[in-house]
Image (cartoon, rainbow, N blue to C red):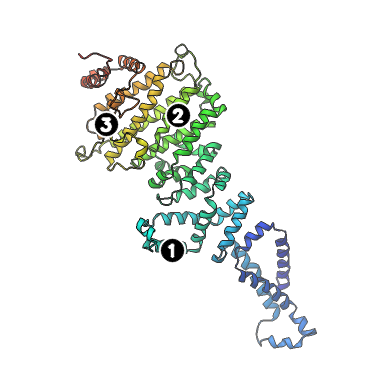
């Protein structure tokens, strides 16, 4: 192939360039500095001169012989070499190179133009192809830089943290990635318009948030709100995979990919700071109030064959999301309840949509789908207690209970929301914290169903759920080697005396509740305890719960 052939290719390339849309042409030009563009234009002119060098010399300017070097390359060979460079260099720069630092402002301006023009697909494609990995690297690197003290910030003193940050963004690709993240990708309008179509792009960004410092509550709120509203298929698929097992998210990652859930709950500080419960919880509450399709479904007769259809409504994905969010906190000993208390809002709303019917005559625990979800929520909270008990069990080589662990009564933490991200301390204390707040949440949820009329929720469901709590109390009373069991029994005792306000010293019991508890105790299977000589457990429940409530008389 000669230089003239390359010229033909270049000519075709220039023709193709003229038909490329202006916005894409502007993007490709950002790979080159102004000097590079000038050199390539001059190269094209010089190439034409070289191709006509021999003819011009022979017919017009014999003096051009001055530029010939004895033994050097002839003009057509130089033309061949320059044509080759003009074809290969732009190709390599676009496909294997990167944007020069000098073009960073123009690059951000271009992305802002795409955003304003709502060219979201092109914008996300550019970010995914050229910046996503470096945004991730930027966030991970920034997470590890020590935060400056308030005094250093006020006095604007340069510290080692500033030097580390300068070194981090000195890398051209990471530095540009930081600009794209902070000035483009964080914009709420972009997140709301694109995260449902590109959820993995945004989950990759969140996965780089390893510390409280780089967490972004607004970013996560906009992202999750869109996913839960649209019932995003990727999110639903991950929740289905998690719902098949009681393993932690980290354990499940060994066998399956969970890019969204793992991004949200891999790192404690950012997970707490990002408030992932807020967009999901708020939208589920709205859907229970205003989503007519969901409300109509919840009023339908419960049918096992239709349970898969529940994934078509926000309540199912919201409940599973909360379940695994709290379970992950328990698995990792985070000492934070991840706002499990949203469940206390779900239960009354499910009761409100439950149609009023003669449920004793209909029979069964869950005649309607609203009752199915009430039972499901309670069983998931039961699972949190069981998980804490399981993880709190001393290892076989443990010499005994850690006497140094301090129990803290619920009365010291009457306002769970104000506790926020407080870390109770050691592992045993974290278990106590989890158990305390789970039982508090259970108490408030139980109070809602205790007070609900029996034409809203079957009495049988109330009795079976309450019986599970009595079973916990008796079973855990037998295990005095597990600190988590001791704490569970202590707080369950407070629960039975006052389910609505577990930590209150004032009893707020109602006749409806006492009637339920009396029926539960009458039908409770006491034989396993009496058979094994554990009558003291039954007597303890009577002395500490039933007698103070006036359900039975003191013997």
Residue 432 position in % (x across, y down)? 29, 36
Q: Mark 2 Cα within 10 Å, few/some/many (few <14, many 20+)?
A: many
Residue 545 position in % (x across, y down)? 26, 21
Judging by the rendered image, the residue that carries numbered circle 3 is 485
Judging by the rendered image, the residue that carries numbered circle 1 is 166
Q: Is residue 36 above or below residue 61?
A: above
Considering every residue shown, the one lying at the far front of the view is 155
Which corner quadrant holds the N terminus?
bottom right
Is disc 2 placed on a helix, strand or loop?
Answer: helix
Q: Is residue 113 above or below residue 225?
A: below
Cα–Cα span, label 1 and label 3: 51 Å
Q: Determine whether, in the image, residue 255 is placed left or right of residue 504.
A: right
Residues 193 and 286: in front is 286
Cα–Cα span, label 1 and label 2: 48 Å
Q: Is residue 73 above or below residue 424?
A: below
Q: Is residue 330 visible?
A: no
Considering every residue shown, the one lying at the far top of the view is 361
Q: Nearer the observer, disc 1 or disc 3?
A: 1
Contact flag, marks 1 and 3 (Cβ < 8 Å): no
């Amino acid at each position: 192939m000669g230089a003239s052939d390359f010229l033909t290719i270049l000519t075709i390339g220039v023709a193709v360039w003229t038909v490329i849309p202006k916005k894409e042409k502007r993007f490709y030009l950002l790979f080159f500095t102004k000097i590079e563009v000038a050199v390539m234009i001059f190269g094209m002119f010089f190439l034409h001169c070289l191709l006509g060098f021999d003819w011009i010399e022979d017919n017009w300017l014999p003096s051009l012989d001055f530029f010939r070097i004895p033994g050097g390359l002839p003009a057509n060979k130089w033309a061949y070499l320059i044509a080759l460079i003009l074809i290969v260099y732009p190709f390599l720069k676009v496909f294997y190179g990167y944007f020069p630092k000098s073009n960073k402002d123009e690059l951000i301006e271009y992305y802002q133009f795409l955003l304003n023009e709502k060219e979201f697909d092109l914008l996300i494609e550019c970010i995914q192809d050229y910046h996503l990995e470096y945004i991730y690297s930027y966030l991970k690197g920034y997470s590890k830089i020590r935060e400056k003290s308030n005094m250093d910030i006020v006095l604007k003193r340069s510290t080692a943290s500033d030097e580390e940050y300068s070194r981090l963004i000195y890398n051209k690709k990471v530095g540009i990635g930081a600009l794209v993240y902070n000035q483009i990708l964080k914009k709420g309008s972009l997140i709301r318009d694109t995260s449902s179509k590109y959820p993995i792009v945004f989950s990759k960004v969140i996965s780089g948030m390893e510390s409280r410092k780089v967490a972004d509550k607004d970013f996560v709120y906009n992202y999750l709100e869109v996913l839960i509203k649209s019932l995003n298929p990727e999110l639903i698929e991950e929740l289905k995979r998690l719902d098949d097992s009681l393993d932690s998210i980290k354990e499940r990652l060994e066998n399956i990919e969970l890019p969204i859930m793992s991004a949200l709950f891999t790192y404690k500080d950012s997970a707490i700071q990002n408030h992932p419960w807020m967009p999901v919880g708020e939208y589920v509450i709205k859907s229970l109030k205003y989503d007519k399709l969901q409300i109509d479904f919840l009023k339908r007769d419960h049918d096992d064959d239709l349970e898969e259809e529940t994934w078509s409504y926000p309540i199912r994905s919201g409940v599973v999301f909360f379940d695994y969010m709290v379970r992950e906190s328990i698995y990792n000993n985070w000492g934070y309840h991840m706002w499990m208390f949203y469940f206390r809002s779900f239960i009354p709303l499910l009761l409100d949509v439950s149609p009023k019917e003669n449920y004793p005559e209909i029979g069964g625990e869950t005649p309607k789908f609203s009752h199915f979800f009430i039972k499901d929520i309670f069983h998931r909270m039961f699972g949190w207690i069981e998980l804490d008990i399981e993880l709190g069990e001393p290892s076989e080589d443990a010499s005994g209970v850690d006497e140094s662990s301090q129990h803290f009564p619920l009365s010291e933490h009457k306002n769970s929301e104000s506790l926020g991200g407080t870390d109770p301390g050691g592992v045993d204390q974290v278990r106590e914290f989890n158990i305390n707040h789970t039982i508090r949440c259970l108490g408030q949820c139980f109070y809602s169903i205790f007070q609900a009329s029996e034409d809203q929720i079957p009495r049988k469901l109330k009795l079976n759920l309450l019986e599970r709590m009595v079973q916990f109390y008796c079973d855990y009373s037998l295990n005095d080697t597990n600190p988590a069991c001791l704490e569970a029994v202590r707080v369950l005792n407070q629960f039975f005396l006052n389910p609505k306000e577990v930590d209150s010293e004032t009893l707020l019991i109602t006749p409806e509740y006492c009637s339920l508890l009396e029926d539960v105790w009458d039908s409770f299977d006491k034989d396993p305890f009496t058979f094994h000589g554990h009558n003291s457990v039954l007597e303890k429940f009577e002395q500490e719960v039933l007698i103070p409530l006036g359900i039975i008389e003191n013997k």
